[in-house]
Amino acid sequence: MIICEKILGKITDEPFASCQADPVEIEWHEAYKRIHQKKTKSGVEIGIRLGTDILVRGLRDGDVLYQDGERVIVVEMPPCEVIVIDIDEDHPEMVAKVCYEIGNKHAALLKGDGPLQFITPYNEPTLVLLNKLHGVTARKDVRKLDFEKSISSTVSGHSH
């Protein structure tokens, strides 16, 4: 078993340009956990044991966890069900309401494709709630979460 204890960089960084990537799948809700036991796509067993800074930063798609010559183990976050939230440009005040409601559920919140679009992991009660807000349209979609666009400080497993 290979033990990975730190993030070495991003797969797009120059030192890894010619390396063969062996992805390890990390679901979005696992990104802020310190300890994992996983298998890479090629079947290599790895243990991930990270410091407490991961509780704030989180693992991100493309993070390199291990390098052995020309092979690297890289984090791959699969697409997941999300809620895409669009706020009508005539109702920009609803940004605060949407952020409040998502924060009140302790859910992850990320910037979307524009200044009035947000993304949060999917759950049906949240989708129903958001669609009841005036000037807000929310829809279910499948996307890869990009934690580089994170608005919330951490992802929490807390729920009501």
Image: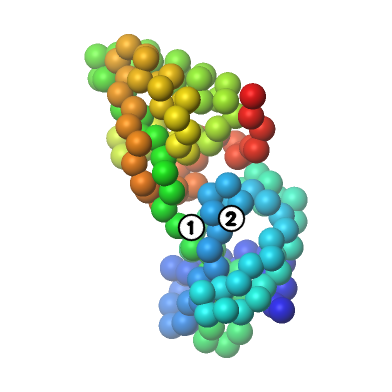
Residues at circles 2 and 1 in contact by the CB criterion of under 8 Å? yes
Residue with the mark numbered 2: 59
Instruction: Identify the residue at horizontal 60%, vertical 36% (top origin).
Output: 153
Please, which residue is most extreme toward the front here?
Answer: 124
> Where does residue 142 sit, x and y in percent of width and height?
36, 46
Placement of the N terminus among the 4 image quadrants: bottom right
> Where does residue 69 sit, x and y in percent of width and height?
57, 87
50 displayed left or right of 129: right
Instruction: Identify the residue at horizontal 30%, vertical 15% (top origin).
Output: 135
Placement of the C terminus among the 4 image quadrants: top right
Front residue of 11 and 158: 158
Front residue of 57 and 132: 132
Instruction: Identify the residue at horizontal 45%, vertical 30% (top origin).
Output: 124
Q: Which mark is residue 77?
A: 1
Amino acid identity at mark 2: Leu
Number of numbered discs visible in the structure rendering: 2
27 displayed left or right of 87: right
Q: CA distance from mark 2 to mark 1?
A: 9 Å
